[in-house]
Image (spheres, rainbow, N blue to C red):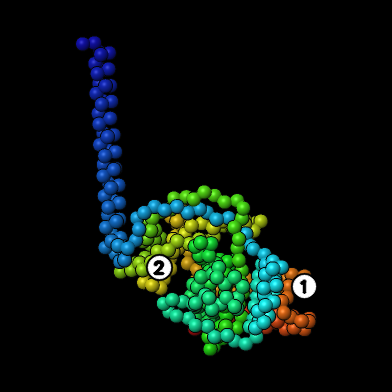
Amino acid sequence: MQWGQIKSLFIVCFLVLDVFLIKQLIDKQEDVSFITESTKEEQLQLNINGLDDLSEETIEAPLIYAVNQSYSAEDSIRLEQYSNQNNVIVDEIYLFGQFDEPIPISIDEDSGVNMESLNSLILNSGEYTYWGKDEKSNSLLFFQTMEQPIYYNQNALLFIQLNDDDEMIQYVQTKLEQDEEQEEAKDLITEIDAVSRLFHNAGSLEQGDTVTDVALGYHNVTSLPNGLQILNPTWNVTVDQAEHYFINAIAGLAYPQNDDFIKTTVASFQDVIQTASTSDFQFIQAEDEGEETELIEEIELNLLEISNAIIGVEEE
């Protein structure tokens, strides 16, 4: 046999061997991947409780493009009908309200706040959902809803301040509206996948935690210079009926916790009032300049009390 033929035979044999080895490597990688995924699922089941009620169904939801909603002349007319309070709109998008006398509000630990009870007190209150009471600031948080709640967004918020008797004394309201440009719905990660990512990737969940609820809402991905906000579908994972963890329902990344939300929000409201020019204020009910000045001073004082209360708790 000639050397050229022998060399060709060796080449063919080595090619066959290479193909065989590559196939073996791919098969092993697939086996490892399968084992890894199986192990991750087993670890999740062994460490986290409450998974049986979670859905593995893939659903769709769109990104929402939203902008600040300005209060209209019609809104001002409706506000004038609330005779138990004084209001001022700042920069057209911030509504500050102060009640003439403290107003009791009933808060149930299970059902929250009866939103219908706020209809005669606060404009568009039906477009918000009760989130909870913050003990440090003695205030109530309500998130605006666009079919689903918009979590922790200063521009989609009803913030009610209470006195020592848990009566309402003052509130701030902001509101978003959908921009004309919108996207088609996108596939979301499943509820069980959201929990898995919080456990394996983010390290937010610990052994023995119980997932008590998973709900869909929206979270601000980014704010553009023109005021446009991009709201992303977000899974709200509730653990032990108390802690909330948020994960991007498209990309699967966990959002940071919102521990300083009230502190930064109140500071933002204070800044809005302090930096506004005279033309930026639109007063409702106030009859003269003296009443207007007094209203602004009292609003600022109440916001300052919240800031001081939060600082006092943090220093303890």
Specify whether residue 315 is in view. no
Give the percent coordinates (x, y) of residue 190: 38, 55
Q: Is residue 74 left or right of residue 168?
A: right
Residue at the spot 26% in from the left edge and 42% down from the top edge: 28
**Given the current orientation, which residue lies at the most extreme left position?**
1
Q: Quadrant of the N terminus?
A: top left
Give the percent coordinates (x, y) of residue 4: 27, 13
Asked if marks 1 and 2 touch (Cβ < 8 Å), the reply is no
Q: Which residue in the structure is indicated by mark 2?
A: 238
Q: Which residue in the structure is indicated by mark 1?
A: 278
Residue 256 lies, with reference to residue 88, above or below; the image says: above
Q: How many neighbours does mark 2 have within 10 angstroms: few (below 14), some (14-19), or many (20 or more)?
A: some
Snapshot quadrant of residue 171: bottom right
Residue at the spot 53% in from the left edge and 65% down from the top edge: 145
Q: Is residue 67 left or right of residue 289?
A: left
Residue at the spot 57% in from the left edge and 83% down from the top edge: 168
Snapshot quadrant of residue 242: bottom left
Count of residue discs: 2
Q: Amino acid at mark 1?
A: Thr
